[in-house]
Image (tube, grey):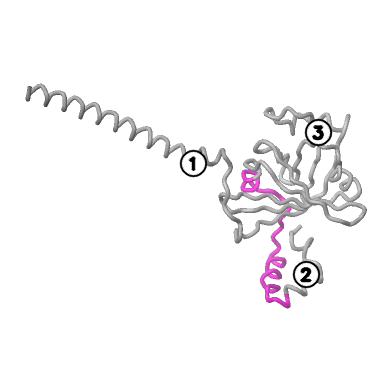
Amino acid sequence: MSFGSLVFTPLVKKLQERYGSRRQYERMENSGATQDRLTEFETEFLAQRDSFYMATTGATSWPYVQHRGGPKGFLKVIDDRTLAFGDLRGNKQYISTGNLLTDDRVAIIMVDYPRQARLKILGRVEILEGEKAKGWLDKVRMREEKTPIERVFVIHVEAYDWNCPQHITPRYSVEELRDGMKDVEKRIQTLEQENESLRKELAAAHATSKEHTS
């Protein structure tokens, strides 16, 4: 299934027509390319993500957006059409859980700020608790995470889409900054060692000069 077939409603298409982008998106829809199976590229992208934003809709029809975070790769790729993650014990509001039990559709967006890339995923969520979750706990558990898992969210991918990088401001985590500074730190360390050697050589040369003049 293509992403456009799910989000390009008749009114959306009219707006695209009005503002001059319909021909471009119509070609995309008619290309026959589906966007419902994750490739190795998406799998690698997901493995590096440590957060995402998840939108759900409840009985009041109001959308609700929640941030989810954890160690890199906590959103697991089970197969090319299935994702899963452990729902950790939190503030006990259960808004996303309640919404998904009302309407199982979910929209997820993940952003790689340093590389200015973003991936949108549409899917349907199956919530597993108790006995039903047992077979999934080992699949979603992260060794670094000590908070108990209350339930497992299994996301059946309907479609995905890559967004353009426009207007994504590059931002870097502390870990990314540390990695980026490693070469600089090595260079500084080398220069300090060279400076120390030069100081010792100059001191020795100065001492020899004094001996010769005394």
| First along the sequence among labels 2 and 3 | 2
Characterize the local packing of mark 3: few (<14), some (14-19) or many (20 or more) Cα atoms within 10 angstroms: few
The numbered dot on residue 12 is: 2
Q: Single out the residue that lies furthest toward the front.
A: 214
| First along the sequence among labels 1 and 2 | 2
Q: Single out the residue that lies furthest toward the left.
A: 213
Q: How far apart are marks 1 and 3 (CA)?
A: 34 Å
- Residue 208 as seen in the image, left or right of residue 112: left
- Residue 39 as seen in the image, left or right of residue 183: right
Q: In the rendered image, which quarter is residue 34 located in?
A: bottom right
Characterize the local packing of mark 1: few (<14), some (14-19) or many (20 or more) Cα atoms within 10 angstroms: few
Residue pictured at 74% horizontal, 63% vertical: 4
The numbered dot on residue 129 is: none
> Magenta segment, which residues?
17-45
Percent coordinates x, y for residue 7 in the rendering: 78, 62
Q: Distance between the residues labelled 1 and 2?
A: 42 Å
Q: Disc 2 vs disc 3: which is toward the camera? A: 3
| First along the sequence among labels 1 and 3 | 3
Q: Which residue is identified by label 1? A: 180
Q: Does the magenta stretch include residue 35?
A: yes
Dot 1 falls on a residue whose secondary structure is helix
| Whether label 2 touches label 3, CB < 8 Å | no
Q: Which residue is identified by label 3? A: 89
Residue 103 in the image: above or below residue 207: below
Q: Does the magenta stretch include residue 26?
A: yes
Give whichever of 44, 142 is nearer the camera: 142
Residue 104 in the image: above or below residue 131: below
Percent coordinates x, y for residue 22 in the rendering: 71, 73
| Whether label 1 touches label 3, CB < 8 Å | no
Q: In the rendered image, which quarter is residue 140 located in?
A: top right
Amino acid found under the numbered disc labelled 2: Val
